[in-house]
Image (cartoon, rainbow, N blue to C red):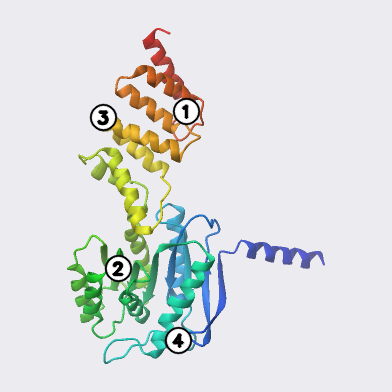
Amino acid sequence: MKKITLTFALFIGLNAFAQVKTEIFESFKLQQKRDISYYIPEEYNEEDQHTLIVVLDAEYLFDDVVAKAKFYSRFHGMPPAIVVGIHQQAQQARFKDCSFSEDNGLPTEEGKAFFEFLGMEVVPNIESTYNISPFKMIVGYDITANFENFYLFKENPLYSSYISISPTLAPEMESRVANRIGAIDKQIFYHLIVEKNRNAKELAELNTSLKTIEKETFKYYFDVYDTDHTSIATYGLGKAFDDIFEIFKPISPKEYKTKILTSEEPAYAYLETKYNIIKETFGFTKRVDLNDVMAIYSASKKKEDPESLKELSDLCKKEFPDTMLGFYFEGEYFEEIGEPKKALRTFEKAFGMDEIDFLTKDMALEKIDALKADFGY
């Protein structure tokens, strides 16, 4: 009896912390039941907005996408994400779901039903349950990669990011996609991933047409890998996540050296621009990374830019209110503009607050003692 009770308790415990689950979704649009897998971050906070990633061909792609989402989110390479995987292998459902007319390249009646199943049932259901940001992604492979393009033709496209892995294109899709993206007034990311030996004329034409689009609101990536049709997704997904969420990442050493130090703009302006772009792209305000604060602090000192130091101190008082950051940076600002008495009072305030990163009470005390010595205290 004890053994049974312990086993049951372990089962309950494991499921309480489960991150991935598969459920049966009863669809009115499809008039059938479908298996759907969900990944919800174990640190999910209903106050924070999450990127929604819809994964077609879930049996093939879901685990790989979840692994990427967990890794990049954990190491600050992307926002927290909820991943929804649509199972399509049973009874070869993918071919019915994503079917199109060979005459005009448009979805068949079965394709239209699947289109509405995702857009009018699956996504709204997730949005009603979880806090989802306006930035949504869709990932497809082969015939399902072609299908995701149909969402571009909605008046307001449902997805902001499209990862298309070795697509089998419907007739005229190579020109229709580019024409449509050229007309969309919305931030769109489009990632086309193909294997090296895939000599499909329409894919080459699609790449050529997408490369010619020059819009600030359109980001296009084209990656070719020396692998086969089966392995292409494993090769391509990591690079795609890197590219799509590049702006979301903390400031890197290379970014610091090549973009911040070389810019004629104030150091703080770079931080402001970066976080404004993140808000515009992903639809929510990202909390400022301590790494980015330290990068701008270092650049402000190196560029002898006291005004950036002042703006940074004001930001830190809001973002890290219980720590020394804001007042310590403000104290250095007063030092640099020749206001030693104000600097002394400000460093005294910093001394009474919590240490953070490299800033310690000893450092504040050194500043206080040095200033007092200058005044003869």
**Kind of residue at disc 3:** Glu
Q: In this view, which residue lies farthest toward the right?
A: 1
Looking at the rendering, which quadrant does residue 133 occupy? Answer: bottom left
**Residue 307 location (% of width, % of height):** 29, 32
Mark 2: amino acid: Tyr
Residue hosting label 4? 93
| Amino acid at dot 4 | Ala
- Give the number of the disc on residue 360: 1
Q: Nearer the viewer, residue 228 or 224?
A: 224
Disc 1 is placed on an element classified as loop
Compared across the picture, whether 197 is left or right of 118 comes to left
- Disc assigned to residue 120: none
Q: Gap in Å between the C-alphas at discs 4 and 2? A: 25 Å
Q: Are marks 1 and 3 in contact (CB under 8 Å)?
A: no
**Nearest-to-viewer mark from 4 and 3:** 3
SS at circle 3: loop
> Which residue in the structure is indicated by mark 3?
304
Q: Depth-wise, is mark 1 or mark 3 nearer the camera? A: 3
Mark 4 to mark 3: distance in Å?
63 Å
Please name the residue that numbered disc 2 is placed on: 190
Q: Quadrant of the C terminus?
A: top left
